[in-house]
Structure formats: structure tokens, C-alpha cells
Image: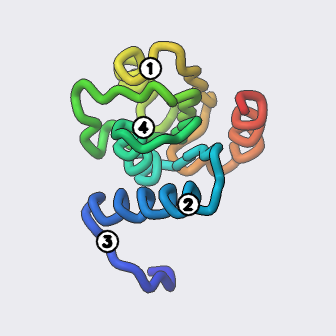
């Protein structure tokens, strides 16, 4: 599978990696940092953005709410956009809609009709959703 030299860190190691990257960018003088993640990356970023780490914007594409735990009471004040496909069984739109008010009631939710978790045949629609909301 792939040629990654890394190892899976049960979500904890990946969160530490993102935190280290954010801190590095801050140390280099960047004062505007946005996080965007797809599936597992959305889960990792959500847990980072719910902590005291300073990010400006959070975007989640297909957060795997049916597959991974999104802690009760998870507050994501920097969350601006969540996108998912209407046929996504890993990130079901109805589950995302029920969680969104707790995450951030002001965040935009975009459901891409016909798309599954992998967006095959729907990349242009996903690109449009992201471009229109950024």
C-alpha cells in the first residue's frame, strides 16, 4: 500500500504532527493558518482545532462521523465549511447535519448530490463547492 515511510499513530501521533506543523509555521512568522482535511484528516484537524491551537479557519471534507468518534461537545468555532456527498456512508449527510450545530452553528454545510466518500466523477463539483466557500 503506497510508499509512505511513516506509521499510523492511532490519531494521536497525527494530531501531534499537525500541532508541530502549526507551531513551526507560527515560529516562522505566519499569522494566518487554515486547516483543511479530508476524511481521517478532517477528524485529526477537528481535534486539533478544538484545542487552544490558533488557526483561522477549519474546513472538513467528508468527516468520517459514521466511522470515527467525534467527541460529544466538540466545539469548532473556526469551522467554516463541511462538505460531504449524498451517497457517502462514511460521512453521512444526516449525521453531519445533526452534529453541525454543536460544532459551529454558523458553519456552511454543502451536500454534493450523488457523490460517495471518494468523489469519483464528482471532483469538479467538490472543487466548485470549495472555491465558492473560500
Q: Is residue 78 above or below residue 127?
A: above
Disc sitting over residue 8 in the figure: 3
Q: Earlier in the sequence, mark 3 or mark 1?
A: 3
In the displayed structure image, the side of residue 79 where residue 11 appears, left or right = left
The x, y position of residue 29, in whole percent, is 64, 56
Would you name the residue on which mark 4 appears? 91
The x, y position of residue 20, in whole percent, is 43, 63
Pair 2/3: label in front: 2
Q: Earlier in the sequence, mark 2 or mark 3?
A: 3
SS class of the residue under badge 2? helix
Would you name the residue on which mark 2 appears? 27
In the displayed structure image, the side of residue 41 where residue 83 appears, left or right = right
In the displayed structure image, the side of residue 41 where residue 124 appears, left or right = right
Q: How many marks?
A: 4
Whether the residues at callouts 4 and 1 have beta carbons within 8 Å, the answer is: no
Identity of the residue drawn at 30% across and 29% down: 74
- Name the image quarter holding the C terminus: top right
Pair 2/4: label in front: 2
- Per the model, the C-alpha gap separating discs 4 and 1 is 17 Å
Whether the residues at callouts 2 and 1 have beta carbons within 8 Å, the answer is: no
- Per the model, the C-alpha gap separating discs 3 and 4 is 21 Å
Would you name the residue on which mark 1 appears? 104
- Per the model, the C-alpha gap separating discs 2 and 4 is 35 Å
Residue situated in front as seen by the camera: 133 or 91: 133
Whether the residues at callouts 3 and 4 have beta carbons within 8 Å, the answer is: no
Identity of the residue drawn at 62% across and 62% down: 28
For disc 4, the neighbor class at 10 Å (few under 14, some 14 to 19, many from 20) is: many
Residue situated in front as seen by the camera: 110 or 26: 26
SS class of the residue under badge 1? loop
**Does any portion of residue 13 appear in the rendered image?**
yes
Amino acid at each position: 500500500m503506497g510508499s509512505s515511510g511513516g506509521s499510523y499513530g492511532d490519531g494521536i501521533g497525527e494530531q501531534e504532527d499537525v500541532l508541530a506543523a502549526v507551531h513551526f509555521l507560527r515560529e516562522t512568522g505566519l499569522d494566518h493558518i487554515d486547516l483543511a482535511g479530508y476524511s481521517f484528516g478532517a477528524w485529526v484537524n477537528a481535534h486539533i482545532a478544538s484545542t487552544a491551537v490558533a488557526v483561522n479557519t477549519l474546513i472538513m471534507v467528508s468527516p468520517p462521523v459514521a466511522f470515527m468518534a467525534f467527541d460529544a461537545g466538540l466545539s469548532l468555532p473556526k469551522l467554516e465549511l463541511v462538505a460531504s456527498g449524498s451517497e457517502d456512508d462514511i460521512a453521512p449527510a444526516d449525521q453531519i447535519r445533526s452534529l453541525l450545530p454543536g460544532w459551529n452553528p454558523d458553519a456552511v454545510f454543502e451536500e454534493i448530490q450523488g457523490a460517495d466518500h471518494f468523489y469519483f466523477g464528482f471532483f469538479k463539483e467538490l472543487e466548485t463547492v470549495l472555491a465558492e466557500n473560500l
